[in-house]
């Protein structure tokens, strides 16, 4: 059962990421990799829900939560692309990972597909879980997800609204929660997947395996494709102002700024 569900997720994720790679070849915007990543996770979760043999409240909850996450992220990314913005992280990654140039970003799309499959571990365990109802601890996991989801949406909307105002061009935003962390959106993103992993531990005998997903995601965000290229771009754009921001402000966990 688990292996057959994994194959469903595999075909959905790699099929959609292959399609996104073709779109990249036509449009030359590497940001479609992120769109494919978030969209494929939602589609894979929906496909697993459709084909699961046991449908209970727990399975309904996880498909709703994963679709909420997928739809929001996908719309956010498509909206950013529609304004003609190319995520500078991809330009930095392309510059630092020379192999990506020759392969026309195919490696990047493959890696995004692998990460999407890793993030499917919690939903896979929940769909194959031994229980279908909810316990009091499940409500904690759901509340954890909802708070993180709303918080991530709020901080990204806050930053996007600031950047849309022309009078703010070239001015670093350090208001709101961005005063307490340089990348609070990533903090809440990791917490979203931690909440789903916690939900999975209550669903399956081997549910603890689900924590592999947020762990790998956190490592990639903090050390590889998330924060490092983003910080490199921000230093290029804001120079000493951003260097000063680095000295005073926490990297990812919101905390009081240094004086």
Image (spheres, helix red, strand yellow):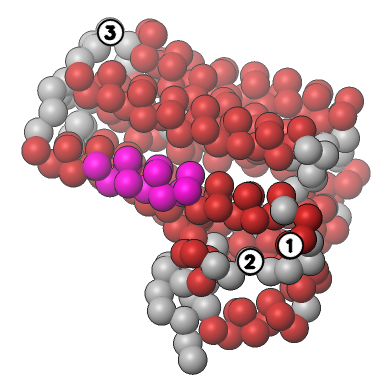
Q: Position of residue 110 (x, y in %)?
A: 68, 36
Query: Above or below — where is 227 with respect to 144?
Result: below
Whether pointer 2 and pointer 1 mark residues with C-beta atoms closer than 8 Å, the reply is yes
Q: Residue 140's quadrant in the figure? A: top left
Q: CA distance from mark 2 to mark 3?
A: 49 Å
Q: Closer to the camera: disc 3 or disc 1?
A: 1
Residue at 47%, 64% in the rendered image: 177
**For the residues carrying marks 2 and 1, which lies nearer the camera in this image?**
1
In the rendered view of the protein, which quadrant contains the N terminus?
A: top left
How crowded is the residue under tag 3: few (<14 C-alpha within 10 Å), some, or many (20+)?
Answer: few
Please rate how many residues cluster around mark 2, counting C-alpha atoms within 10 Å: few if below 14, some from 14 to 19, many from 20.
Answer: some
In primary-sequence order, the first of circles 2 and 1 is: 1
Q: Is residue 44 left or right of residue 37?
A: left
Q: Name which residue lies at 35% across and 35% down.
A: 122
> Is label 2 in a helix, a strand or a loop?
loop
Query: Where does the magenta region start and end?
Result: 143-154
Please name the residue that numbered disc 3 is placed on. Answer: 53
The front one of 40 and 4 is 40
Q: How many circles with numbers are drawn on the protein?
A: 3
- Residue 190 in magenta stretch: no
- Secondary structure of the residue carrying numbered label 1: helix
Q: Which mark is residue 168?
A: 1
Question: In this figure, which residue is indicated by the disc labeled 2?
Answer: 173
Which sits earlier in the primary sequence, circle 2 or circle 3? 3
Q: Is residue 247 above or below residue 250?
A: below
Tell whether label 3 touches label 2 (CB within 8 Å).
no
- If you read the primary sequence from the N terminus, does the residue marked by circle 3 or circle 1 appear first? 3
| Main secondary structure found in the magenta portion | helix
**Quarter-of-image position of residue 47:** top left
Q: Is residue 81 left or right of residue 103?
A: left
Q: Secondary structure at mark 3?
A: loop
């Amino acid at each position: 059962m688990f292996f057959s569900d994994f194959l469903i997720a595999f075909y959905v994720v790699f099929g959609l990421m292959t399609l996104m790679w073709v779109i990249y070849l036509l449009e030359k915007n590497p940001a479609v990799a992120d769109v494919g990543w978030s969209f494929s996770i939602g589609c894979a979760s929906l496909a697993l829900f459709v084909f699961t043999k046991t449908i209970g409240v727990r399975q309904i909850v996880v498909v709703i939560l994963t679709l909420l996450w997928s739809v929001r992220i996908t719309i956010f990314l498509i909206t950013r692309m529609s304004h003609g913005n190319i995520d500078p992280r991809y330009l930095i990654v392309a510059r630092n990972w020379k192999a990506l140039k020759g392969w026309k970003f195919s490696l990047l799309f493959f890696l995004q597909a692998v990460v999407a499959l890793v993030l499917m571990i919690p939903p896979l365990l929940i769909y194959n879980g031994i229980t279908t109802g909810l316990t009091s601890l499940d409500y904690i996991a759901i509340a954890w997800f909802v708070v993180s989801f709303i918080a991530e949406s709020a901080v990204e909307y806050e930053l996007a609204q600031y950047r849309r105002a022309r009078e703010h061009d070239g001015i670093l935003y350090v208001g709101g929660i961005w005063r307490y962390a340089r990348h609070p959106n990533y903090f809440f993103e990791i917490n979203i997947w931690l909440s789903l992993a916690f939900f999975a531990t209550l669903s399956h005998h081997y549910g603890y395996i689900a924590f592999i997903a947020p762990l790998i995601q956190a490592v990639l965000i903090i050390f590889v494709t998330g924060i490092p290229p983003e910080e490199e771009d921000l230093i290029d754009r804001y120079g000493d102002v951003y260097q000063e921001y680095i000295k005073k402000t926490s990297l990812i966990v919101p905390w009081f700024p240094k004086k």
